[in-house]
Amino acid sequence: MAGNWKMYKTPAEGKTFVRSLAQRIGTVEHAVVVVAPPFTGLSAAVDAALGTSVSVAAQNVFWDEQGAFTGEISPPMLTSLGVRWVIIGHSERRLLFGETDQGVARKVRAALDHGLLPILCVGETEEEREAGLTEERLASQVSKGLADVRPDEAQLLTLAYEPVWAIGTGKTATPEIAQEAISFVRGRVAAALDPEAAQVIRILYGGSVKPDNIGELMVQADIDGALVGGASLDVESFAAIVEYPR
Ligand code: PGA
């Protein structure tokens, strides 16, 4: 269960959040709980998460270790803070900041090379769905995004299927639509890596996940968890998602 805070929360707010969340959920055995603060909040969040059931993700990473890349953050910069996870290729990065499938693949490779666990996001836009291009888009994002990954690395990898039309819109994909797309994504992982990798890899659903729809999403056969935006900004609602009815 991963919370993507996007461009919300100062370091102090993030620290308070992580402390309260950790206290509220206690020891969690059925799920891995991850929060993704903005870069400036990572250090404070990692400190607050020490010794708790919460771990910390960055929202992006660059592929080189160092160099003349103004504004970028490298994998060793994240691992040296104690960050374990990184979201890669979120649709906001792709649509607003020009990220390409090739760049996403390089980021996934660089993350794995430095011991960061990637959460690779894929998903179609509303126009693509309406034009019947959903599968084509997902197939291309999965095969290109995983181009440099080996099948034996599947257990280190998490995919997130996030239909762009469901992000921050309140329009959740129905559990059936989410299941259908995620089952398709799993099939593409089998083609890109191998069938065993497709079973091992974790696939999350993201897009307007809330405490009141998490249960019906999680009963779907291929949905292993959720990437949560808006509802992860509030301790009570994120805790309710982590503790979804099982
Ligand atoms: P949302 O965002 O839960 O606010 O729809 C999901 C995401 O962008 O990861």
Image (spheres, rainbow, N blue to C red):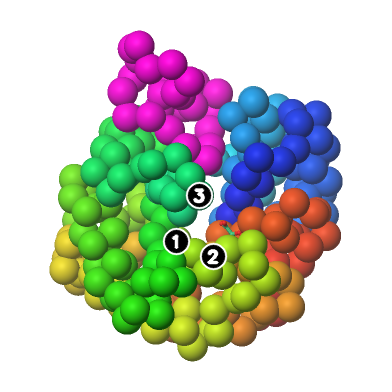
Q: Amino acid at mark 3?
A: Glu
Q: Quadrant of residue 227?
A: bottom right
Residue at image point 47% right, 79% down: 178
Residue 240, position as x, y percentages in the image = 76, 67
Q: Which residue has dot 1 on it?
A: 160
Determine whether the beta carbon of the residue marked 2 sits less than 8 angstroms from the nearest atom of ligand 1: yes
Q: Decide: is 43 above or below 187.
A: above
Q: Which residue has dot 3 on it?
A: 92
Q: Decide: is 176 above or below 24.
A: below
Determine whether the beta carbon of the residue marked 3 sits less than 8 angstroms from the nearest atom of ligand 1: yes
Q: Which residue has dot 2 on it?
A: 206
Residue at image point 49% right, 27% down: 78
Which quadrant of the figure contains the N terminus?
bottom right
Q: Quadrant of residue 38?
A: top right
Residue at image point 61% right, 84% down: 216
Q: In this view of the protein, can residue 26 be seen by the observer?
A: no
